[in-house]
Image (cartoon, coloured by chain):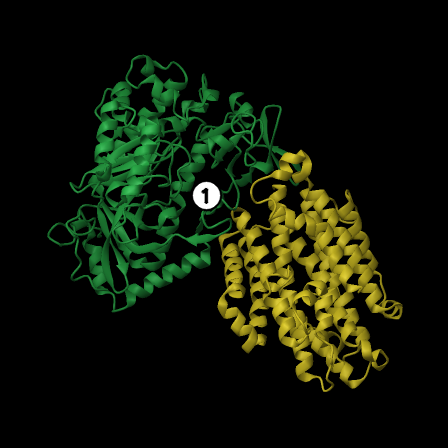
Amino acid sequence: MLSRVAEAIYWMARYIERAENTARYIDVSLNMTLDAPIAFSDQWQPLVSITGNLDGFQARYRTADRDNVIQFLALDRENPSSIVSCLSKARENARSIREAISSETWEQVNRYYLLVSSPAAARRVRENPASFFADVKLYSQLIAGVSDATTSHDEAWNFMRLGRLLERADNTSRLLDVKYYLLLPSVEEVGGAVDDMEWSILLRSATALVMYRRKFGQISPEQVVEFLLLDTEFPRSILFCLLNAEESLHAITGTPPGSYRNGVERRLGQLRSELAYAQVHDIISQGLHEYLDGFQRLLNGIGEAISETFFGMQQLNGAMAGAGGPTSDVLSGDQSQRGAGWHRGYAGDLRQ
Amino acid sequence: MIIEGYDSGGWFDEIFDAGGRPRPEAQLLLDIIHSQPEGEFERLQETANAALVNLGITFNVYSDGAGVERVLPFDILPRVVRDDEWDHIERGLKQRIYALNLFLQDVYNDAKILRAGVVPEELVLSAPSYREACRGLTPPQGIWCHITGTDLVRDKDGAFYVLEDNLRCPSGVSYVLENRRLMKQTFPDLFASSLVRSVDDYPSKLLDLLSFISPRPDHRRAAVLTPGVYNSAYFEHSYLAQQMGIELVEGRDLIVIDDAAHMRTTRGLERVDVLYRRIDDDFLDPLTFNPDSMLGVPGLMRAYKSGNLGLVNAPGTGVADDKVIYAFVPQIIRYYLGEEPILDNVPTYLCWREDDMAYVLEHMSELVVKPANESGGYGLLVGPQATSEELDDFRGRVKHNPRNYVAQPTLALSRAPVIVGDHLEGRHVDLRPYILYGRDLYVLPGGLTRVALKKGSLVVNSSQGGGSKDTWVVSARGPQC
């Protein structure tokens, strides 16, 4: 398939997944403020940090209160990773490859964008955020389902799946990190009653509570981490994402499983086996945040390697290809910067 | 829906006859309108509007800046064409395209028609769309104008006239196909029981055509070449590629190596045999045409001239739809085919002729004045609706560059009813059928009916506030079992 099409389909999937996960971050925080007996004075700002754009936020909002943060993360077009920005880019990508995806997939992406960009969205976010974010999550899943059921599971589909799973792995690691931030004031109390409830809210936000209960029963922080990080069957667990991303990657290249022919396969295989043989106890004693930070950096490296390996044909022809059509500054420009720089920015903010 | 009181206003109406009675072919349609409960028709119209938004069936408007998408307004009342009238149109179009193709082959090769003085050589060579680079070329299978979207209008006498031959990159066919799909959703029963001729074949016919002209008999890899997502017709480019199941490429996806075009894919370069290009000649290849073009592909013309690439339409076809050359199409048909034209031209004054020029200057307020090489309704003057400043401005332009202007009488374009609130009002329409020239000539039954939605307006172009209707070709006995 065309490199440009592969790139657009991969990014379309990432943006759609990212929008869903931003909705999940917000949801977990909303839930925590509703249920938690203690008032977290500064729990919304970490959310901004974690999704990567604290400077952008502080430049235009005075206080990191609930309304401002939700506005910023959901509907602020100036924020490149807000839900509406993600959907706008997902739709632009989808529009540029409409011929390569099914009509049904396109229609859902288009409707999704209309859902979050319509004037009614602002009112819903204010008056009934839970229902709005539930719709956002639903639409992302709808698109994955519709495309699974209406497009051939060919190279394009595998690029879509690869994008979705890598984004999800990245986002699950951030979701775990939300917990880390929220508990900063009370690290010593890990394991307390309040803590249990928060872990269960976290699980619920990853739609993981029921599945977790079925597997482990009682909530224990160590097992929650194990479930979200190292489970091989739960679809939002990081290891599950990597295993399946690897499967799609090898379906794209035709390289036999367990071997590699390019940098992407080598890096992804390495990271997957690192997790496959990791012990949750070691991770926690090493420090969850540090571990997740390192993981995100390796994952960014994989993203960059994908750009170079599969989408690099774009740049083959030097200036002419770079100049491209009238779309280049908006589409590929946006994403090739993203591939390299944006993610670094994302991780960089985290360490502030 | 209130039909009573509909006033055809003395114009030729596509649905009602001069006495205000529905034409026989439109009777079933009227029955259906009558049978809908009150408000239902308006509701169906709203459902159709919402579907267009959800499906993202849009075009881009240039003047509003990049990225502004608009839905092409769609009126769910179809325009109905009687099948015997349609057969006449079809014969006329085939005759015309066949002759124009012979003209193109001749003009770029032996130039017999120019030497015979049937079409003045000076006019052909001075056409901005004449391509020196195409001299001596014969495209694969000898076909130049593979896809044509001829603009037809109906005057008050009820006869169809050819207004323009669009031989370059005519657009709009995707709306025909999508409008029909929408109509089937809106009125499923109607299509089950009627004899509306189907348009569903178009993508297959187009794909056949593309593979027919492939220079390599054993490889027939075709792609649609688009200027990109901000082009006004981008929806159509992606739609057609999707319907045919072929790649949609941009200039930056292509590279010419060893005089052959290749696509950059995730597995390296892959050769392309045929491009259905929706980029104008000027931007196709910066090495041959406009050197500043960022949309095209350097070396594409080399690949084409070497016989390694089919281009649809062939570069150079624009010369035959220059509005000055248009005036000579009846002579062109007579010269090559020895037949009388089946479809008439609209009478056309060429400012290049001294007598015509004098007439045009004097009668400008009655005429429509058009630049010879523009399309999309840009740069034209509708005399009866123009201010005296605009008239003076155009007189100046015409005198300054007579070759570049033609004028036609202001036609009494036929009208068709459209839904306005809870009642019907007449609006002017035209008709753009689509003709494919591959193994044989195929005319898509119906085509795009464009509507000037602004009350009283004669300009139907989508860029100027036009909308569209589905076009039904139905039996003269009316659409019934």
Residue shown at 44%/28% (left/top)?
B314
Q: Position of residue A317 (x, y in %)?
A: 66, 34
Residue shown at 41%/27% (left/top)?
B129
Residue shown at 80%/60% (left/top)?
A295
Kindly tell me whether residue A76 is visible in this rendering. yes
Identify the hue of chain A. yellow
Left or right: B231 as drawn, with respect to A192:
left
**Pointer 1 residue:** B240
For mark 1, give the secondary structure: helix
Give the chain of mark 1. B
Q: For the image shown, how many numbered marks are present on the structure?
A: 1
Q: Disc 1 residue type?
A: Leu
Quick check: B278 above or below A106?
A: above
Tell me which corner region of the image, top left, top right, bottom left or bottom right, holds residue A17.
bottom right
Front position in the image: B352 or A26 = B352
Front position in the image: A327 or B338 = A327
Q: Position of residue A283 (x, y in %)?
A: 85, 67
Front position in the image: B310 or A331 = A331
From this viewpoint, which residue is outermost toward the left? B19
Tell me which corner region of the image, top left, top right, bottom left or bottom right, holds residue A81.
bottom right
- Estimate how packed mark 1 is, as few (under 14), some (14 to 19) or many (20 or more) residues with alpha carbons within 10 Å: many
Left or right: A191 as drawn, with respect to B342:
right
User: Can you tell which chain is drawn green?
Assistant: B
Left or right: B416 as drawn, with respect to A172:
left
Residue shown at 77%/64% (left/top)?
A350
Left or right: B140 as drawn, with respect to A266:
left
Quick check: B129 above or below B458?
A: above
Quick check: B126 above or below B224?
A: above
Front position in the image: A348 or B92 = A348
Q: Quadrant of the N terminus of chain B?
A: bottom left
Kindly tell me whether residue A272 is visible in this rendering. no
